[in-house]
Image (spheres, rainbow, N blue to C red):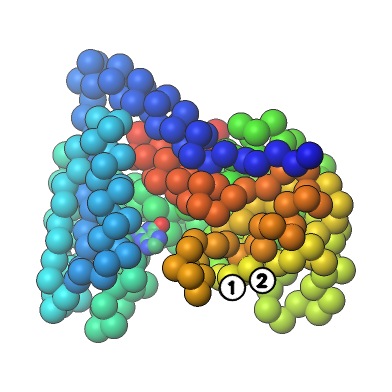
Amino acid sequence: MYQIIDGKRISQEIKDELKEKVTALKEQGRTFALAVIQVGDDPASSVYVGNKKKACAYIGIESLSYELPEETTQEELLKLVQELNGNSAVGGILVQLPLPEHIDEEKVLLAISPEKDVDGFHPVNVGNLSIGRPGFVSCTPAGVIQLLKRSGIAIEGKECVVLGRSNIVGKPMAMLLLRENGTVTVCHSRTRNLREITRRADILVVAVGKPKFVDASYVKEGAVVIDVGIHRNENNRLCGDVDFDSVAPHTSAITPVPGGVGPMTIAMLMHNCVEKTLQ
Ligand code: GUN
């Protein structure tokens, strides 16, 4: 029988720990505020932003909401980011992605002070992660590490294969698994003999962005499979990058979609609003 890794439960556990911590620190006079900026009204972004604000309220972090119209210029957005950088009452700044086409995403992310970059997207934080210095870590891969640790799955010495090489998930995921003393391989769309490599994995993290891309033929018997993908299928139901029904019986543990990695991203964002460094 395989274990279903319960991201909903684990994310709740983390949020409860943070709530307790924030309550105690507030009693000592510390304050917590996250600025959340959304440009335009993309419905998916509105849902994510709403959930982030709800999590802030639960934990006791003040959220400062900036809902800007689609026509907002890059200069206006950069000016707001600069103001928030200089506002000592604001501990974290989050610019929800994607931004409208006329705005250069990279320019905006670079403008956020690395000290307030709770998404962990700024090159300074990415660089710190890669050389083992403290700093903000990208929330989704940080959440995967927490899922593994809190499910009693050891990483040290294991063959870890990351499928996907994005800046937000694949690359920081590889760095984090390496930091945990895993033996790490990163595969991607140009990898030859992909199955040969994924079938070596004791821990397989899938972040390819293709619905049900990974079937049982990619997975070694007894492996741990972490599915970062989230898609809507033809029946409007959520599914991941992994074909759960065919893969799960061959694993020792697997994350479901929904209820696996998804809820962890916000929990780790909240972590970053409270503590700068991931233990
Ligand atoms: N859009 C989708 N995921 C994310 C995220 O983790 N952070 C930000 N800022 N935008 C996103």
Judging by the rendered image, the residue that carries numbered circle 2 is: 213
How busy is the neighbourhood of tag 2: few (under 14 within 10 Å), some, or many (20 plus)?
A: some
Whether residue 90 can be seen here: no
Give the side of residue 228 with respect to residue 39, left or right: right
> Could you tell me which residue is drawn at 28 percent across and 20 percent down?
23
* Residue 210: mark: 1
Q: Secondary structure at mark 1?
A: loop
Left or right, 21 with respect to 62, comes to right
User: Which amino acid, mark 1?
Assistant: Lys
- Mark 1 is surrounded, within 10 Å at the Cα level, by few (under 14), some (14 to 19) or many (20 or more) other residues, namely some
Residue 145 or 10: which is nearer the viewer?
10
Horizontal placement of 73 versus 250: left or right? left
Give the image location of residue 99, x and y in percent.
29, 73
Label 2 CB, ligand 1: below 8 Å? no
Q: Is residue 227 visible?
A: yes
Q: Are marks 1 and 2 in contact (CB under 8 Å)?
A: yes
Q: Ligand 1 within 8 A of label 1's CB?
A: no
Q: Is 175 above or below relative to 14?
A: below
- Residue 128: x percent and y percent? 52, 51
Residue at image position (29%, 57%) is: 47
Q: Quadrant of residue 28?
A: top left
